[in-house]
Image: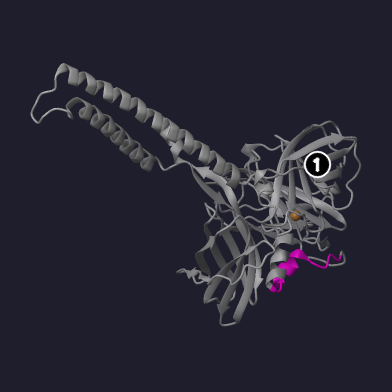
């Protein structure tokens, strides 16, 4: 009997415009304070998100969070704020927040200290992500209880047919014994049938719940013809049933409706960051640069009207594409094939003769640990360059890819939250963007603006394994991509 099948519980989680990397990281000012925020989305919807805030500048005495659901409709009175608990370390606060619906939540954060009150809004997308099997011990216990109950019913029916008609202390005749056995056999068949039907009913319910609750990114069909990729987005059940709940329209994220990434597999040696044009509803077209043949994994980032980010995943076999040079904001890099044994590379040569240095402190990288990943850009003489400029409005873009492609995270200096979602959140709340965010995102797009030669990205690897990092900056009108390999421990 497949009693384990009885044991599926729907749980949920949140993720960003990323694959396999559900946690939210944000580095920002809140008034006079500077914060590094990480949010571990809930295991269920409704569910509890764990929030940790490290105060990296300023003295903070208390932090409260009010979660507000975003779907373009009035949410009525906000709930009472939850207070984060201070820890022994005065710079570190942690707490929990309930998220009740799938979609985007804004965590309205109020930070208090001697310098006054600072405010910050953290967008957190939430959705059911996976099912969990029942806990083994509980399952075993329930299974044994079921056996006891079933055996009890069978023995009761047998005893009733055998002795129910006899006077007390009268021994059953062979005829009584026979009817007892027949009753037990019939009851056994009945009980087995009932359990089988129950199991079937439960599995059907679980499958339906899974179908209606579990988030699956929109399907993406990719085809190649004459130097161009055509991408057709579709919708699945999850999207179709949520259309009236929130806006399915697309909004541009740093100037583009779609950010498309092509990565040659399994060597991870050719990487392209392209920006397809929308040519119809849900249909995009990308002009390809020169690309060598091979199997390419496709990641396509979009942001919905409420700020809900999604990453669609597909793959395509490409022939040698003659293509041209990169146009617009498109960029890419050709590098050495990935080898798990190489573990760490911290220096990457750039196409202009300069290099990019990963400023590691030498400590081992661990899964689930938040850190700031810093990269310095140098010229051919190994001097920090002074002509870094914003690339699509940001000082840098970084893509963290696990070697088996189970993780793909597109991160910016302000964190893992897409710029479009962040801007909606700031607009909703009327909270001014923090100074650091402004610097990070270099909002004025002016190419005359000169930036320091260093970029940093807050991130935590979701799981142990080998990773390749692509770090993109714009220098003197040209995009340079540094490539680094890393090994992450449990
Ligand atoms: Cu980016």
Q: Is residue 438 magenta?
A: yes
Please state if 135 lies on the left or on the right of 168 as rendered: right
The image shows residue 328 at horizontal and vertical percentages of: 88, 52
Q: Would you say 252 lies left or right of 425 here?
A: right
- Residue at the spot 91% in from the left edge and 42% down from the top edge: 324
In depth, the one of 145 and 163 nearer the eye is 163
Tag 1 secondary structure: strand
Camera-side residue of 131 and 392: 131
Q: Which residue lies furthest to the left in this view?
A: 169
Total tally of numbered discs in the picture = 1
* Magenta region includes residue 336: no
Q: Pick the quarter of the image with the N terminus.
A: top left
Residue 211 picture quarter: top right
Could you say where residue 439 lies in the image, as x and y percent from the top left? 74, 68
Residue 299, relative to residue 67: is it above or below? above
Whether residue 144 is situated above or below residue 276 in the rendered picture:
above
User: Relative to residue 114, is residue 440 drawn left or right?
Assistant: right
Could you tell me if residue 455 is visible in this image? no
Mark 1 beta carbon near ligand 1 (under 8 Å): no
- Taking depth in this image into account, of 150 and 422 the one nearest to the observer is 150
Q: Which colour scheme is used?
A: one colour
Q: Mark 1 points at which residue?
A: 231
Q: Give the range drawn in magenta.
A: 430-446
Residue 205 seen in the current view: yes
Q: Position of residue 210 (x, y in %)?
A: 56, 43
Residue at the top extreme?
A: 174
Q: Based on the displayed image, in which of its 4 quarters is residue 64 positioned?
A: bottom right
Q: Residues within 10 Å of mark 1 (few under 14, many from 20)?
A: many
Q: Where is residue 481 in the image (x, y as percent from the top left)?
A: 78, 50
Which quadrant of the frame does ligand 1 lie within?
A: bottom right
Residue in front for this viewpoint, 192 or 46: 192
């Amino acid at each position: 009997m497949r009693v384990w099948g009885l044991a599926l519980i729907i749980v949920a989680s949140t993720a960003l415009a990323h694959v396999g990397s559900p946690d939210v990281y944000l580095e920002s000012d809140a008034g006079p304070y500077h914060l590094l925020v990480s949010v571990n989305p809930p295991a269920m919807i409704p569910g509890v998100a764990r929030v940790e805030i490290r105060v990296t500048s300023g003295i903070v005495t208390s932090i409260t969070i009010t979660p507000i659901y975003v779907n373009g409709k009035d949410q009525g009175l906000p709930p009472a704020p939850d207070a984060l608990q201070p820890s022994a370390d005065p710079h570190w606060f942690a707490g929990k927040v309930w998220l009740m619906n799938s979609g985007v939540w804004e965590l309205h954060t109020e930070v208090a200290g001697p310098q006054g009150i600072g405010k910050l809004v953290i967008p957190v997308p939430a959705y059911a992500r996976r099912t969990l099997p029942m806990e083994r011990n509980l399952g075993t216990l329930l299974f044994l209880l079921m056996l006891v109950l079933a055996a009890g019913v069978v023995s009761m029916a047998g005893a009733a047919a055998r002795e129910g008609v006899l006077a007390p202390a009268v021994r059953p005749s062979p005829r009584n014994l026979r009817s007892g056995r027949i009753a037990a056999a019939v009851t056994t068949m009945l009980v087995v049938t009932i359990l089988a039907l129950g199991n079937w009913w439960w599995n059907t319910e679980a499958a339906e719940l899974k179908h209606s609750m579990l988030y699956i990114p929109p399907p993406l069909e990719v085809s190649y013809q004459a130097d161009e990729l055509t991408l057709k987005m579709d919708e699945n059940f999850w999207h179709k049933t949520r259309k009236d709940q929130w806006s399915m329209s697309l909004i541009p994220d740093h100037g583009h409706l779609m950010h498309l990434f092509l990565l040659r597999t399994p060597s991870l040696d050719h990487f392209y960051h392209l920006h397809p044009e929308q040519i119809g509803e849900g249909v995009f077209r990308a002009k390809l640069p020169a690309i060598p043949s091979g199997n390419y994994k496709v990641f396509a980032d979009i942001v919905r009207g409420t700020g809900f980010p999604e990453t669609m995943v597909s793959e395509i076999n490409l022939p040698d594409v003659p293509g041209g040079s990169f146009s617009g904001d498109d960029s890419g890099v050709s590098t050495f094939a990935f080898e798990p044994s190489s573990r760490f590379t911290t220096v990457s040569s750039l196409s202009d003769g300069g290099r990019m240095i990963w400023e590691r402190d030498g400590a081992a990288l661990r899964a689930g640990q938040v850190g700031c990943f810093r990269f310095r850009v140098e010229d051919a003489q190994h001097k920090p360059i002074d002509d870094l400029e914003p690339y699509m409005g940001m000082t840098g873009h970084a893509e963290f890819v696990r070697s088996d492609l189970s993780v793909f995270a597109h991160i910016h200096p302000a964190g893992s939250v897409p710029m479009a979602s962040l801007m909606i959140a700031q607009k909703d709340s009327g909270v001014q963007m923090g100074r650091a965010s402004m610097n990070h995102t270099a909002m004025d797009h002016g190419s005359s603006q000169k930036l320091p030669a260093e970029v940093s990205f807050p991130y935590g690897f979701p799981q142990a394994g080998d990773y390749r990092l692509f770090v993109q900056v714009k220098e003197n009108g040209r995009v340079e991509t540094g490539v680094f390999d890393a090994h992450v421990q449990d």
